[in-house]
Amino acid sequence: MWLLLNTLRSPTLMTHMAPSAHIQPSVDSTSVFKSDLFRGKVLFCTGGGSGICRGMTAAMMKHGADAVIVGRKLDRLSQTAKELSEATGRACIPVQADVRQPQALREAAAKAIETFGRIDFVICGAAGNFLAPISGVSENAFRTVIEIDTIGSYNTIKATLPHVRASRGSYIHVSATLHYRATPYQAHVSAAKAGVDALSAVLAVEEGPHGVRSNVIAPGPIDGTEGMDRLRPKDNRSSGLSIPAGRLGDVNDVANATIFLFSDAAAFITGQVLPVDGGAEHLRTQFLPYPQAVLDPASVKGMINTKL
């Protein structure tokens, strides 16, 4: 027995026997949910021309929904709408609008009703971000992020709410995990996303009796997105971050959460914030060296694309 115990304690043997971390697979929503789950339903999505919101829209369309994607760049929207329609066989129309302009969003919602006759689901996904310390971000830049993220979500709600009430539909707000703890260089986005989370919670309480649900998806480190490209240090492109799920996130991970939250399986879920981060928030480490990044910003310029 003594020999066995000491053999098991051998550093060499323990090294060889050390298990490798399990990596949670990323699956396509069609392997889990019915293909016609949202047939006859209509999605209205701001920020749907690219990135995470494009992936969320694509997933909804794969499961039968038609879609209206809203953004400022009509050429990008038109190309995305064409590609999504061809890939899914569902209708997708692009509508140019700035979420900071309430009238433009009302016109976008009217276009959705004119085309499809209803709005069942809304994704408030338009957002802006860049890296800058409080001492370096201008008042105008701070205000702009608040206007796009928080006020833009409010404007989207106001423009679509009568139609979502009529269909007893649901909202998903795309937020972040940055404000759960203080994140350097992200004061503007943290403030904006905290406002989005609060707005969704109040919407859930006020509109629940009208049959409307509202939830938040808070993506963590999602690989291949503009946000991740901006926030991850430029000299650290590996996937070896401290994430319990064993990998960086994929747009499909956010899309799958979207399908669930909009489905009837989530009928009793409202006013909630769902981080889609592989458990990263529980092991969060600063993405910039601390306190070096705040004491000497010039020393980390090579790691980030910042607007100082």
Image (cartoon, rainbow, N blue to C red):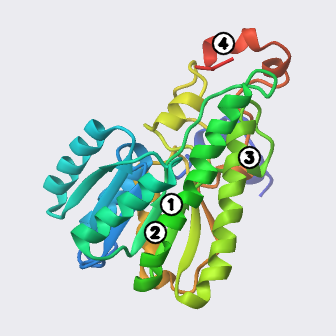
The x and y percentages for residue 217 are 56, 60
Q: Is residue 277 visible?
A: no
Q: Nearer the viewer, mark 4 or mark 1?
A: 1
Q: Are marks 3 and 1 in contact (CB under 8 Å)?
A: no
Q: Are marks 4 and 1 in contact (CB under 8 Å)?
A: no
Instruction: Tell me the quarter of the image containing the N terminus.
Output: bottom right
Residue under label 4: 301
Location of residue 241 with respect to 104 vertically, above or below? above
Return the mark for residue 160.
2
Q: Earlier in the sequence, mark 2 or mark 3?
A: 2
Few, some or many residues within 10 Å of mark 2 (<14, 14–19, 20+): many
- Mark 2: which secondary structure? helix
Amino acid type, label 4: Lys
Amino acid type, label 2: Thr
Q: Earlier in the sequence, mark 4 or mark 2?
A: 2
Location of residue 12 with respect to 297 vertically, above or below? below
Instruction: Tell me the quarter of the image containing the C terminus.
Output: top right
Gap in angstroms between the C-alphas marked 3 and 4: 24 Å
Residue under label 3: 191
Gap in angstroms between the C-alphas marked 2 and 3: 24 Å
Gap in angstroms between the C-alphas marked 4 and 2: 42 Å
Residue 160 appears left or right of 9: left
Amino acid type, label 1: Thr
Q: Are marks 1 and 2 in contact (CB under 8 Å)?
A: yes
The x and y percentages for residue 253 are 45, 57
